[in-house]
Amino acid sequence: MPRLLAAPIAALVQLLIACGTILAHEHRQVGGYEMIVGWIDEPAYVGYMNGVQLHLIDAAGKPVLDLGDGLKVTVVFGNQQTERGALTPAFGVTSGRPGEYRVTLIPTRPGIYAFRFVGAIKGQKVNEVFTASPQTFDPVRDSAEVDFPANDPTRAELALGLQRMAPRLDRLAELADQVKTLAAFGIVLGLVGVLLGLRAGREHRR
């Protein structure tokens, strides 16, 4: 019996995990379709591969297996946004969950993200924005929460450090240019001094 039950139990566990992920998404009725939207992996962390996940179900409760290329998504963070990306199926004949579509990206800042879907689903126009919140899907978290054994600086922190260093580096570059100019001027003065010394020596011998 344990061997006979192993496969069904494993399938049930996978189903529960999948349902838990979907429950962490936002469910919204858009015309004749239900859109279930969130991160591919939740919680989402800065610097880790992730992306937009869409489960699409029709009015009959069946997954939409042919989305075509009429629906695209833009990821928005503050006043920045990506270009519109085409959603690709995350399922095959024998793998994945039918009706699931994705666009991958790596979030580089913690905070609130929004996903704007624009286009059409089989002729039905779509212009919907899904925003992270306690009632929908998670904001992106700082990876320091899960880093081990050490909290290495994130790319955002490295970029901020470089931005802060930029004025100092520019000043050092200016000083280096000034030193080069002074060195060149000193060499010229030295050569002039040598020439004047040679001339004075010749006049003295005369």
Image (spheres, rainbow, N blue to C red):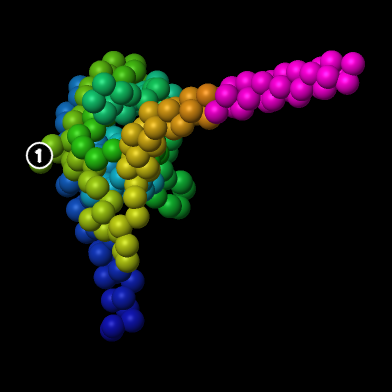
Residue 174 highlighted magenta (yes or no): no
Q: Residue at x 37, y 42 (%)?
A: 158
Q: How many labels does the image show?
A: 1
Dot 1: what SS?
loop
Q: Look at 23% across and 56% down and name the residue there.
A: 145
Query: For the residue carrying disc 1, how many other residues have a C-alpha within 10 Å: few (<14), some (14-19), or many (20+)?
Result: few
Q: Which quarter of the figure has residue 98?
A: top left
Residue 1: x percent and y percent? 28, 84
What percent of the width, then of the height, locates residue 46? Answer: 31, 45
Magenta residues (range): 179-206
**Up-down relation of residue 70 to residue 101 (above or below):** above
Which residue of the protein is positioned furthest toward the bottom in this rendering? 1
Q: Is residue 198 magenta?
A: yes
Left or right: residue 14 versus residue 70 is left
How far across and down, in percent of the image, does residue 12 sit? 25, 64
Q: Which of 4 and 96 is in front in this view?
A: 96
User: Foreground residue, 58 or 154?
Assistant: 154
78 shown above or below 105: above
Q: Quadrant of residue 104?
A: top left
The quadrant in which the C terminus is found is top right
Direction from residue 26 to residue 108 in the image, left or right: right
Residue 5's place in the image compared with 51, above or below, is: below
- How far from the left and from the top, in percent, is residue 147? 30, 59
Residue 87 appears in the figure: no
Nearest the viewer among 171 and 180 is: 180
Q: Which amino acid does label 1 sit on?
A: Gln
Majority secondary structure in the magenta region: helix
Q: Which residue is drawn at 22% across and 46% down?
A: 141
Q: Which of 153 and 40 is in front in this view?
A: 153
Examine the rendering and report whether any part of residue 24 can be seen: yes
Q: Name the residue under label 1.
A: 135
